Image (tube, rainbow, N blue to C red):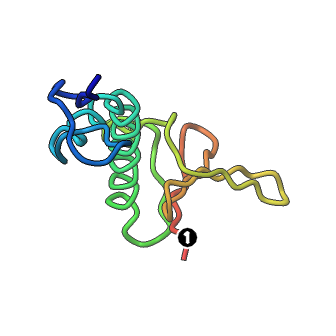
Amino acid sequence: MKKKCLECDEPLNGRVDKKFCSDYCRNSYNNKVNKESKNLIRNINNRLRKNHKLLSDLNESGKTKVTRTKLLDGNFDFNYFTSIYTTKTGNTYYYLYDQGYLPLENDYYLLIKKD
């Protein structure tokens, strides 16, 4: 019995371990298989990018104080960040790559840029 392409069911010629008849079929098959996980990663990366851009735009000087409302008006999503840093004094900074924020009192945030 002749092996068939996993994508288009065409008969395969050539190597014994061949699974696809062409690069097109191989790419098409793998794109279908990986679609859901790639969409999840793409959506998270887009959210991180938007958060980072907003922090960069609001923090031109490298150290700025803003309100929670200002961040939310820019569609900032507090669920997405790349790392957390806790100082010896117990302050917790949330980072999006090189841009960070520290929650302060009265719904204010200190925005900082890591060098």
- The quadrant where residue 103 appears: top right
Q: Nearer the viewer, residue 48 or 91?
A: 48
**Closest to the observer, 2 or 74:** 2
Q: Is residue 99 above or below residue 10?
A: below
Count of labels in the image: 1
Check the picture and name the quadrant holding the C terminus: bottom right
Query: Where residue 59 sits: x, y (%)?
Result: 40, 63
Q: Secondary structure at mark 1?
A: loop
Q: Residues within 10 Å of mark 1 (few under 14, many from 20)?
A: few
Left or right placement of residue 63 versus residue 48 in this view: right
In the rendered image, the vertical position of residue 88 relative to residue 20, given as above or below: below
Q: Residue 109, percent across and down?
A: 54, 48
Q: Is residue 71 left or right of residue 101?
A: left
Pick the front one: 70 or 25: 25
Q: Position of residue 57 (x, y in %)?
A: 32, 60
Question: Which residue does the image show at 23% across and 31% down from the upper left?
Answer: 5
Residue of label 1: 114
- The amino acid at mark 1 is Lys
